[in-house]
Each structure stands twice: as structure tokens, then as C-alpha cells.
Image (cartoon, helix red, strand yellow):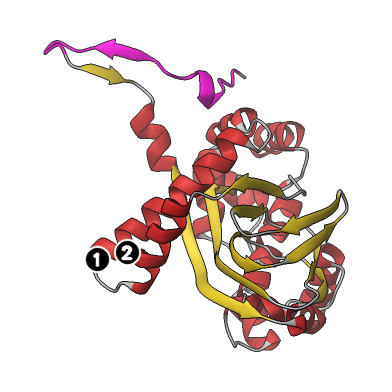
Amino acid sequence: MRREPISRSRQFFTDSRGIQRNRLQIRHLNLLSLEVLDSGYFIGDRKWNQFDVMSPFGRVYYMIADHGWLETSHGRIELEPGFMYLIPPYTRVNLRTADRIEKFYFHFSIRYAGIEILEGINRCFTLPLALELLRDILAAFRGGDLADLLQFQALAHSTLASFIRDGLPDLSQRLALADTYKDVFAYIEQHLSAGLSGRQICGALGSSYETLRRNFSRDNGITFNRYINGRLIQEAAMQLLLTDRTVQEIAAALGFSDEFYFSRLFKQKMEYSPREYRRINAVLRNG
């Protein structure tokens, strides 16, 4: 099966009216989505210190004043004014400050063809923070009209583009794989539930179950069921951190008839029970 990396998919042509076009740009753009889940101006003291924090979404910090640091499996990363930081989804960190920390942040999910494209990177990144960018995103954050909302979204896109261009590993093969299975991922997103099965997906798409099951496992390194369960737990983790729903309510909303089974499945992926996970990561509700 041919997979063409997006970074090499600049197929330009000139149409009958002399307009130069890119065959694939619009299709790729319409498969890409950025959701800003939370944002805030945060001033904290030692109460911000927390060990073993791991979010199902990505985080960007713009450091404004004072000092903190992240303790990661790749070592210590200083949080200093004049820099911005990217923490990809599921990257485990200890949040630390000796005294005071002042930063602006936003939490996000960036998806291409239905998959979280920064998942699995598991390390943090640092880039210089331009004063103009900080000024503009704070102005957009404090504004309240449509232009401010669009400006904030544009600056969030611009920030992530900088990290993807200048800091992160090449993502083109991951995006190309997502493009290959975009119909599968789209169906899963639209029908995400504990009752969803690979046979149901293949039947809805009119595909041979055995062929698609085999190809999906080979190319993605994971079975249908494991991928669906992973998405269910990711969604559950999002709701634990971003809503006040009880564990029972979250389990029921995701189609689990047995709360205890849901809790066991959650612990297998996240290493903590849902209640423990919410307690440990409570710091993410306010910075």
C-alpha cells in the first residue's frame, strides 16, 4: 500500500485559467483539526509542585517570570522567561518550582484524520518565545470578540507549527498512515463506545473484516480493540480532568455497563484508577 508523506505531497499544477494550485493541500487541511481545551494566566507557588503528572492532551507553556522546571525521563528542563515549552500527550513529568512561577498556558488536542498526531513522542521541547507572540496571545486571551477568538486560534496554530517545524521529530509517515485509514478513524470517532467492534467498523465501511483487521494491525502495530480501548480511556481521562462528572457518569457515557471493568481498563493504560488519576493530575485544572 503506497503511503506518501505529506511533506513531499506538494503536487502543484496550473489550471485552465492559469491559476497555480496544490492538488492535496485542501484535502490535508480539512483532515487537520486543533481544539483548544483550556487556557489561562497562571501565577503559582510551591503548591504547583506535583509528581507524576500525565495528561491525555498536549500542553504549551509561555514562561513570563520567575522560574520552575520539569523533571522528565530525558532529564531536567528549566522553565525560564523568554522561552516556550511543549509537553506532548501522555508525557510523564514532575512539575517543580522552588518559589514562584508565572506563565500563560493552553491545553490542546491536534488531530489529523482522527488521530492525535503528537501521541507517542514522550519528551518535552523548548523554543525561544518572541515578545511579540507573547504580547499578541495575551491580548487575544483578554479580548472577547470574534476577532480575538480567531487571533488566539491563529497564534496557537502558529506556536505548534514552530514546534513541529523546528523541534519535533518528522511526523510525515504518521500522518500518511492516518490518511490511509482515515475512514476507519472517522467511523470510530463518530461511534466511539465500549460496544464498538472491529466487525461493526468493517461492516459499516463495506470492507472484508479479515483483510482490514490484518492490514490495520500490521500497519498500526495495534488491533482494532486495543485502539478503540485506547481512545475510550483517552476520552475518559479528558473528562476526568476537564469536567466534574463522576467516574460512574463518565463510564456510562462511554458505554461501559460495568464501572469496575472500566476502572480496571483505565488503570491498565494510565497506571492509576480513575479517581487516583484525577487526584494526581488535579493541578492541570488550573495550570
Q: Are marks 2 and 1 in contact (CB under 8 Å)?
A: yes
Q: Is residue 193 left or right of residue 267?
A: left
Q: Residue at 32%, 57% (x, y): give it.
A: 151
Q: Is residue 5 magenta?
A: yes
Residue 168 appearing in the image: yes
Circle 2: residue type: Leu
Q: Which residue is mark 2?
A: 149
* Quarter of the rendering containing residue 71: bottom right
**Is residue 113 in sight in this rendering?**
no
Magenta span of residues: 2-18
**Position of residue 226 measured from the top left corner of the image (x, y, whole percent):** 76, 53
Q: Position of residue 15 (x, y in %)?
A: 19, 13
Picture quadrant of residue 195: bottom right
Badge 2: few (under 14), some or many (20 or more) residues near its Cα, within 10 Å? some
Nearest to the observer: residue 82 or residue 95? 82
Q: Please indicate whether residue 187 sits to the left or right of residue 54 in the image.
A: left
Residue under circle 1?
146
Q: Looking at the image, which is closer to me, 146 or 255?
A: 146
Residue at the (66%, 80%) spot, across then down: 44
